[in-house]
Image (cartoon, rainbow, N blue to C red):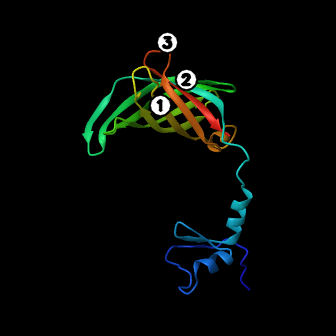
């Protein structure tokens, strides 16, 4: 006898019986997601993850001070002006965390026709215990609407850390505010916040 309690995963080509309607699929405990049919136990697991009864908030995690130097101009492309800004080093400071930015990364930027700049910085950091962590930081820079008004420089950063004491970097969403570091020429300050 076949065990129907296990998750069922079918490729998009393995479609259910043409006579079976959406209602029958749902009543049968199947969920269709992205063209795949997922069994009832996967759906039940998702239902256990209920939304919290509060709005998302952030807590400070640490700060990255990344030094930059020069601009490598790609120039005009079909999707906007593209440039790369080399990342030459820097440091990480925070409660329970310290380290350095490894030279050799870059902040790739694309300025669209509406004046908004999309950024994607990819680099590595080395923590005080020697652990290497990959960093990919994507976001937007929106110019100030008027003189004296604040601009908008926000990013979402993804860390790839090895298993072990720094595993928590892989297990949360981190948001950042960024800008020039006061009193540190040629340095971008990235304040990292954990979404809770």
Instruction: Tell me the quadrant of the picture where the C terminus can be found.
Output: top right
Distance between the alpha carbons at the discs numbered 1 and 3: 19 Å
| Residue 114 lies in quadrant | top left
CA separation in Å, label 3 and label 2: 15 Å
Q: Which of marks 3 and 2 is nearer the N terminus?
A: 2
**Residue at the front extreme?**
146
Residue marked by disc 3: 183
167 lies above or below 11: above
Q: Residue at x 61, y 33 (%)?
A: 193
- Residue 6 occupies quadrant: bottom right
Q: Residue under circle 1?
A: 153
Kindly indicate whether the residue at mark 3 contacts the one at mark 1 (C-beta within 8 angstroms): no
Q: In which quarter of the image is the N terminus?
A: bottom right
Q: How crowded is mark 1: few (under 14 residues within 10 Å), some or many (20 or more)?
A: some
Whether residue 28 is situated above or below residue 172 in the rendered picture: below
Is disc 2 in contact with disc 1, using a CB cutoff of under 8 Å? no
């Amino acid at each position: 006898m076949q065990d129907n309690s296990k998750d069922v995963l079918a490729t998009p080509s393995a479609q259910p019986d043409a006579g079976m309607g959406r209602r029958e699929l749902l009543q049968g405990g199947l969920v269709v997601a992205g063209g795949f049919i997922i069994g009832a136990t996967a759906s039940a697991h998702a239902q256990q993850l209920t939304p919290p009864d509060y709005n998302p908030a952030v807590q400070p995690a640490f700060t990255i001070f990344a030094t930059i130097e020069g601009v490598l101009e790609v120039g005009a492309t079909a999707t906007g002006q593209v440039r790369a800004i080399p990342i030459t080093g820097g440091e990480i400071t925070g409660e329970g965390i310290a380290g350095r930015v490894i030279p050799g990364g870059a902040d790739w930027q694309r300025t669209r026709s509406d004046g908004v700049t999309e950024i994607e910085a990819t680099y590595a950091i080395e923590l005080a215990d020697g652990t290497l962590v990959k960093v990919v930081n994507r976001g937007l820079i929106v110019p100030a609407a008027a003189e004296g008004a604040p601009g908008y420089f926000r990013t979402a950063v993804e860390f790839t850390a090895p298993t072990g004491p720094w595993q928590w970097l892989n297990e949360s969403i981190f948001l950042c505010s960024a800008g020039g570091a006061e009193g540190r020429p040629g340095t971008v300050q990235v304040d990292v916040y954990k979404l809770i």
